[in-house]
Image (spheres, grey):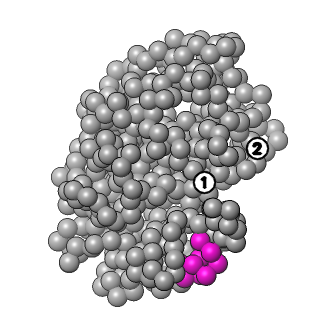
């Protein structure tokens, strides 16, 4: 899988899993009925076709479930026809926005996608004054590295998730206390064959968090800004446990199915996957846990955001779509359907309450343990250079996981 973290939220696949029929998005947990938000009216025509590149799942037009549809109401209110193009990987999405012969108005991008598109000048900075509801979105998300660059806003945050150390209570003793449980050779041997990790270079960032605590002399601060010495140590840490990893996952169904039936007992997973297991009545917990009053274990935050193409985009319809996506009604429906947290804390009502509770939405501004995912580059921040860029992360991961 290309990209640092692009786990595809293939929620319909989960509904077919035996024993997990109670997942909220499969039934009453999702917000039924059509969205009723009012789109903004920026200058320009509100007519025409809006071509959007999206991962499967987080944009619903009623094709999966006719009750789950926030595209059709948008079309009826604005006169803009929406055409969705599914991209099954970050590389595919970047290709659609950058290659000659393709013309798309916008993309729902992961942080590393956003970084590549901004660097390629394939997307344009947002005119946030034209987006109704923009200021209501969490400032922490609006200023996340994948959405802001050079002091300019490029991305409209849509939903967000975080990577945690997940485990099956009772099967992992003692319960893990942090990322070291996944990247300590002694612990990994104890659970050999029953460990799952993302099939993505984001696993290197999770290992960096483990080394930040276990080997402070390395001086790791941001797990996505690693010097060559730090990066070599991280790759070695992953290689040391590689033989004990049972599966490298790319889809929700793998994580939930295998942790749910006990095939796996420990892994680097997404918060909404643990929440789905809990809702289904299956044993699952994580570090940090929801029960932690003051979480001290760092996690990697993953924000999906809308970006506007620099190729003669249908600006009138695109900005209406951005305002629609930022509305509380749509934010609530997206959160209820995906199990991820909305970008607007005020959307934490109805079917979104569960996700907001899991993600501590109200505490986001104070959650200093969240490191938001972003594209690794040679710049280490604070004017320093010499860090390992994204291409070398991808090469190292292909060699490690191959």
Question: With 372 as the anchor, is 191 left or right in this view?
Answer: left
Q: How many marks?
A: 2
Q: In the rendering, which numbered label is found on residue 363?
A: none
Residue at image point 59% right, 66% down: 225
Any part of residue 307 in sight: yes
Dot 2 falls on a residue whose secondary structure is loop
Residue 396 placement, left or right of 58: right
Residue depicted at x 54% and y 16%:
40
Mark 2 or mark 1, which has the lower sequence index?
1
The magenta region covers 226-235
Identify residue for label 2. Answer: 121
Q: Nearer the viewer, residue 205 or 248?
A: 205
Task: Based on the picture, tell me whether residue 118 belongs to the magenta stretch.
Answer: no
Query: Residue 322 appears in which quarter of the rendering?
Result: top right
Residue drawn at (51%, 17%) of the image: 39
What percent of the width, then of the height, locates residue 242?
47, 80
Which residue was labeled with disc 1? Answer: 112
Q: What residue appears at the point 37 percent right and 46 percent down from the top-left corner?
A: 364
Residue 27 appears in view: no
Q: How far from the left and from the top, in percent, is residue 196?
A: 40, 69
Distance between mark 2 and mark 1 Cα atoms: 14 Å
Q: Is residue 97 above or below residue 350?
A: below
Label 2 close to label 1 by CB (< 8 Å): no
Image quadrant in which you'd find residue 261? bottom left
**Residue 274 versus residue 142: which sits nearer the camera?**
142
In which quarter of the view is residue 42 placed? Answer: top right
**Residue 399 versus residue 202: which sits nearer the camera?**
202
**Crowding at mark 1 (Cα within 10 Å: few <14, some 14-19, many 20+):** many
């Amino acid at each position: 899988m290309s990209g640092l973290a692009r786990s595809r939220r293939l929620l319909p696949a989960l509904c077919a899993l035996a024993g997990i029929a109670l997942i909220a998005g499969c039934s009453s947990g999702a917000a039924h009925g059509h969205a009723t938000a009012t789109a903004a009216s920026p200058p320009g025509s509100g007519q025409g076709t809006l071509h959007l590149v999206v991962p499967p799942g987080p944009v619903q037009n009623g094709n999966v479930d006719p009750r789950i549809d926030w595209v059709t109401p948008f079309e009826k209110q604005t006169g803009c026809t929406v055409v969705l193009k599914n991209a099954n990987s970050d590389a595919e999405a970047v290709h659609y926005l950058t290659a000659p012969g393709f013309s798309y108005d916008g993309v729902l991008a992961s942080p590393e996608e956003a970084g590549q598109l901004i660097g390629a000048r394939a997307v344009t900075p947002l005119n946030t004054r034209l987006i109704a509801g923009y200021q209501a979105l969490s400032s922490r998300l609006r200023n996340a590295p994948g959405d802001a660059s050079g002091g300019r806003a490029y991305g409209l945050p849509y939903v967000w998730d975080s990577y945690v150390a997940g485990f099956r209570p009772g099967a992992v003793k003692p319960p893990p206390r942090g990322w070291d449980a996944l990247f300590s050779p002694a612990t990994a041997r104890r659970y050999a064959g029953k460990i799952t990790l993302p099939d993505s270079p984001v696993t290197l960032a999770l290992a960096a968090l483990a080394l930040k605590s276990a080997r402070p002399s390395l001086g790791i601060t941001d797990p996505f800004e690693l010097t060559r010495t730090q990066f070599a140590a991280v790759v070695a840490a992953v290689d040391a446990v590689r033989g004990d990893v049972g599966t490298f996952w790319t889809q929700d169904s793998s994580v939930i199915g295998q942790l749910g039936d006990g095939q796996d007992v420990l892994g680097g997973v997404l918060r909404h996957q643990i929440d789905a297991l809990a809702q289904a009545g299956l044993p699952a917990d994580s570090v940090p846990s929801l029960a932690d009053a003051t979480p001290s274990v760092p996690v990697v935050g993953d924000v999906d955001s809308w970006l506007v193409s620099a190729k003669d985009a249908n600006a009138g319809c695109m900005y209406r779509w951005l305002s629609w996506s930022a509305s509380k009604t749509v934010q609530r429906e997206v959160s209820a359907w995906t199990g991820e947290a909305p970008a607007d804390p005020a959307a934490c009502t109805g079917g979104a309450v569960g996700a907001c509770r899991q993600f501590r939405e109200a505490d986001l501004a104070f959650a200093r343990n969240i490191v938001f995912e972003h594209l690794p580059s040679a710049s280490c921040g604070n004017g320093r250079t010499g860090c390992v860029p994204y291409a070398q992360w991808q090469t190292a991961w292909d060699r490690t996981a191959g």
